[in-house]
Image (cartoon, rainbow, N blue to C red):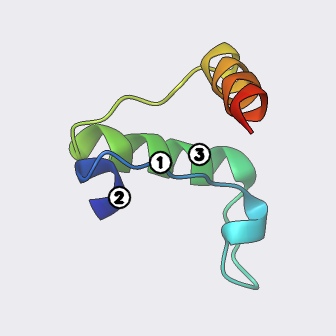
Amino acid sequence: PAAVERGGHVRVGLEDAPWGSELGNVRWVEEAVRSVRLAGGEPATAAEVRAALRSATARA
C-alpha cells in the first residue's frame, strides 16, 4: 500500500472488510501481509506493536 511506501502503517481486521465479504480474518491478514511486503515493508510482530504503543502512550 502507498502508506507503507511512505513509511506509514496499516491495520487490518474484519471491521475493515466490505459488508458481505466471505473472506475470514485470516485471509484478510494474509492479503495485508502480502501487500505490505510487496510495498517493501515487513509486518510488525505483536510484541513490536505493544512496545510501540507503550512508547507512544509514555510520550503523550
Q: Residues within 10 Å of mark 1 (few under 14, many from 20)?
A: some
The first of marks 1 and 2 along the sequence is 2
Helix, strand or loop at label 3? It is helix
Residue at image mark 3? 29
Q: Is residue 43 above or below residue 51?
A: below
The first of marks 1 and 3 along the sequence is 1
Q: Residues within 10 Å of mark 2 (few under 14, many from 20)?
A: few
Rendering quarter of residue 51: top right
Residue 11 location (% of width, % of height): 60, 52
Q: Nearer the viewer, residue 1 or 9?
A: 9
Q: Residue furthest bottom?
A: 19
Mark 1 is on which residue type? Answer: His
Mark 3 is on which residue type? Answer: Val
Work out how far the residue at label 3 is from the one at label 2, CA to CA, in angstroms: 16 Å
- Select label 3 or label 2 by which is in front: 2
Q: Residues within 10 Å of mark 3 (few under 14, many from 20)?
A: some
Q: Nearer the viewer, residue 23 or 12?
A: 12
Q: How many marks?
A: 3
Residue 21 location (% of width, % of height): 69, 76
Residue at image mark 1? 9
Work out how far the residue at label 1 is from the one at label 3, CA to CA, in angstroms: 14 Å
Q: Split into 4 quadrants, where in the image is the N terminus?
A: bottom left
Residue 2 visible to the viewer: yes
Picture residue at 25% right of the left edge, 53% below the top: 6
The first of marks 3 and 2 along the sequence is 2
- Select label 1 or label 3 by which is in front: 1
Q: Which mark is residue 23?
A: none
Rendering quarter of residue 18: bottom right
Helix, strand or loop at label 1? It is loop
Do the numbered discs 1 and 2 sit on residues whose CB atoms are within 8 Å? yes
Residue at image mark 2? 3
Q: Nearer the viewer, residue 57 or 42?
A: 57
